[in-house]
Image (cartoon, rainbow, N blue to C red):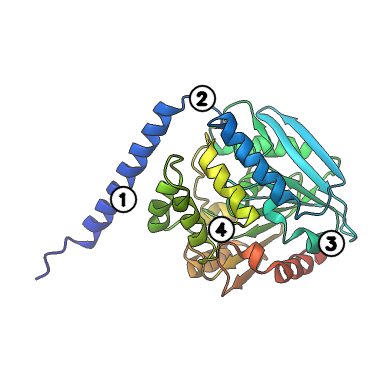
Amino acid sequence: MSDSPPKSTRRYLRILACTVVVGVVALAFALRSPSPVGHWNSPASEDRFLAAYDRAFEDLPSPAETLDVRTDYGVVRVYRFAGTGTSTHPLLLLPGRSSATPVWAANLPGLLTIGDVYTVDLLGEPGRSIQERPISSDEDQANWLDQMLAGLPADQVHLVGLSIGGWTATNLALHDSSHIASLTLIEPVEVFADIPWGTAIRALPAAVPWLPKSWRDGFNSYTAGGAEVQDVPIADMIEAGMQGYTLKLPQPTRITEERLATLDVPVLAVIAGRSVMHDAGEAVDTAERALRGGSVRLYPDASHAVNGEYPNRLRDDIAEFLGKYQ
């Protein structure tokens, strides 16, 4: 007979160990940083991030307009890029965790051939948006984004979300889709499958600001399929945000298949076959079942950094998808 504990016991022990680790880290940060809103750990940390942000921003086209949109939760930085396409509604891009507008450097040239593009620095994340009041629930996350959309000239947008931005877009659509013409979800986390516990554990040290930079670089490389991240402007910006900014956001609630089936806007889901943020097969299966009439695209060789790896294919898929709903 095997001395190994039963499968249910092993699963319980893994969950318990993960919970203890997460609890210890959360407690340490709660004691260290009692502020209820996201903030920079020091003026030097802010300066370091903004310098990296500006360097990465140099790889983007020049924005036609810079907007600071006030919401009940803070001021949201939005850029408008003038497109050459004829899309009825502009695209609005939501970045991933600890990143901001510059993460779209590889995508903007192609997406601008579809139409005007707005980019957003997520509220409560490193960037040029400024959180002023607590964001403590999924409803709060939906409210600030809906208020920001209401402050734009466009009545509706084609909402495009990457990683946590994909969750943020889906969360808004489930609460209020009145400003949304369509959803494009690029490698969304906690939408079609759970984050693997191994990835969650590996992320913990990367979130501790006083640990070496190499730990954060290592995690970022891991999520990008082993890509080099040294001296890469976007990667430098993300690492500076991870090191210098304290998040005060709620853990995203996993969106159930039943709730996904209630979405009332067209959805394009893009899943990376080599993603470490979910099981790609499970994510594709869930998306195909839940998204009635939706479009699901699997990029077999892509990592979670799919937007930088396949910008042209992504542009073509988005253009084809949006062409059905103009």
Between the residue at mark 3 and the residue at mark 1, the CA separation in whole angstroms equals 45 Å
Q: Nearer the viewer, mark 3 or mark 4?
A: 4
Tell me: residue 276, above or below residue 126: below
Query: Is the C-beta separation of discs 2 and 4 under 8 Å?
Result: no
**What is the secondary structure assignment of the residue under circle 2?**
loop
Residue type of the residue flagged with mark 1 = Ile
Which residue is under mark 2? Answer: 35
Graded by Cα atoms within 10 Å as few (under 14), some (14 to 19) or many (20 or more), the crowding at tag 1 reads few
Image spot of residue 67 (x, y percent): 80, 37
Residue type of the residue flagged with mark 3 = Ile
Which residue is under mark 4? Answer: 230
> Residue 100 versus residue 19: which sits nearer the camera?
100
Tell me: residue 229, above or below residue 142: below
**Left or right of 190 in this view: 296:** right
Residue name at image x 80 percent, y 47 percent: 156
Please state, as top left, top right, bottom left or bottom right, where the C terminus lies in the image.
bottom right
Between the residue at mark 2 and the residue at mark 4, the CA separation in whole angstroms equals 32 Å
Between the residue at mark 1 and the residue at mark 4, the CA separation in whole angstroms equals 34 Å
Graded by Cα atoms within 10 Å as few (under 14), some (14 to 19) or many (20 or more), the crowding at tag 4 reads few
**Left or right of 55 in this view: 260:** left
Q: Nearer the viewer, mark 2 or mark 3?
A: 2
Between the residue at mark 2 and the residue at mark 1, the CA separation in whole angstroms equals 29 Å
- Ranked by sequence position, the earlier of labels 2 and 4 is 2
Which residue is under mark 3? Answer: 114
**Left or right of 263 in this view: 38:** left
> Residue 212 versus residue 112: which sits nearer the camera?
212
Which residue is under mark 1? Answer: 15
Graded by Cα atoms within 10 Å as few (under 14), some (14 to 19) or many (20 or more), the crowding at tag 3 reads many
